[in-house]
Amino acid sequence: MSKVFQATASAPVNIACIKYWGKRDTKLILPTNSSLSVTLSQDHLRSTTTSRADPSFAEDTLWLNGKLDEIKPGGRLATCISEMKRLRKELEDANPNAEKFSHWRVHICSHNNFPTAAGLASSASGFAALVYSLAKLYQLPASPKELSLIARQGSGSACRSLLGGFVAWREGAAADGSDSFAEQIASEADWPAMHALVCVVSDDKKDTSSTAGMQRTVETSALFSQRLTVVPERMRAITKAIQNRDFDTFAAITMKDSNQFHAVALDTDPPIFYMNDVSRAIITVVTEYNRVALEKCGKRKAAYTFDAGPNAVIYAPRENMKEIIELIVSYFPQESFNDPFQLFKSAAVQG
Ligand code: 2P0
């Protein structure tokens, strides 16, 4: 029997505090603004991917959650796979002793342990796990930053899931995308008190995909250009807040940016609604909770954020979480949610 190669890797979702929304290059997936996220840890929201190279395989094949998925020529999956094969080929060419299998076909099996495409960043963890598993399969010495350049071409937000903790995706300026990568600005250990509560309001598939929605915003929203003028200062300010463990500033910026992202979605023609009545009620509860906290001690105690779907993520220092969960549960009986609340904290990607 001839030799085969196989590797498994897993990557978690990330939840943005400064949102990525809009591309300046749709093929290379270059964003119109930098973004910043927290990579969630623990085992609840992860993609796990196994890649196998075997000389007997007839074509590259992918199964997503047990179902055969199409690898369209020239599409995002094909791009990521061919980029990883190219890196393996470079390694083989540079090292005469390296085994030559970059030309073999690969079979890839990927599994999400949470609802796919429900605004819970499944493409982020999915492409990060895919690229990471191929990097292990091909025994590449590439750094997470280098791999983020490839994962970005699968799905923009995926580049941030290759690193743990607090991660910035730099928009970059180069036309070839070489400076549009993710980098860690603080590790989980730098701010261990930071926790995230994921409130699954709905796990239905969303109506408007992020990919289609964001380009419609770029093309039709007058508010969008205003957003681009404020993001650079927000990136600077939130980075400083994270490095200083200044939760009040972190919370103020995170909520403002979530609100602005949903405002430009609404300003899109036709309008895009990602939040629903439960999402808006969660905003009201957190706002009131913070109003009382501001009155009492001059600082916010929680921050909501919503992505391209109705589910809420509430960031808060761990010490406030019990109170926040009790508050949310008292306002929203569990039937409002398809899933019980899940508590995560940020952490590094695991292999
Ligand atoms: C984010 N989102 O920063 C923002 C906030 C959704 C709202 O990144 O077209 O699925 O594959 O690059 O990465 C969703 O965008 O879009 C996203 P593509 P992606 O997390």
Image (tube, rainbow, N blue to C red):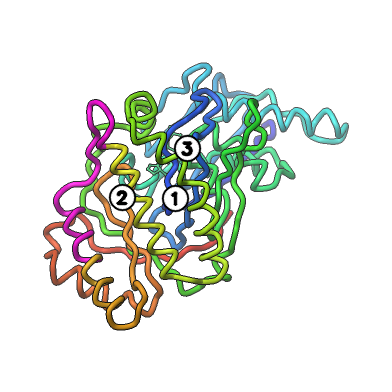
Between 298 and 91, the residue placed more toward the observer is 298
Asked whether the beta carbons under mark 2 and mark 3 sit within 8 Å of each other, the answer is: no
Residue 109, label in figure: 3
Quarter in which the N terminus is drawn? top right
Q: Secondary structure at mark 1?
A: strand
Mark positioned earlier in the residue sequence (2 or 1) = 1
Q: Amino acid at mark 3?
A: Cys
Q: Name the residue type under label 2.
A: Asn
Q: For mark 3, does the 10 Å Cα neighbourhood hold few (<14), some (14 to 19), or many (20 or more) residues?
A: many
Tell whether label 1 touches label 3 (CB within 8 Å).
no
- Where in the figure is residue 148, as x and y percent of width and height? 60, 42
Residue name at image x 86 percent, y 34 percent: 95
Q: How far across and how far down the image is residue 206, in percent? A: 26, 37
Residue 240 lies in the magenta stretch: no
The image shows residue 163 at horizontal and vertical percentages of 57, 53
Furthest residue toward right: 96
Magenta span: 266-286
Image quadrant containing the C terminus? bottom right
Please report whichever mark, 2 or 3, sits nearer to the chain's N-terminal start. 3
* Residue at 48%, 71% in the rendered image: 246
Per the image, is 280 magenta? yes
**Image height of 229 relative to 53, above or below:** below
Q: Label 2, on which residue? A: 259
Task: Locate residue 196: give its quadrant.
Answer: bottom left
Mark 1 lies on residue: 18
Instruction: In the rendered view, tell whether residue 111 sits above or below residue 284.
Output: above
Is the CB of the residue bearing disc 1 within 8 angstroms of ligand 1? yes
Visible residue check, residue 59: yes
Where is residue 310 shown, x and y percent of the image?
24, 48
Marker disc for residue 161: none
Label 3 residue SS: strand
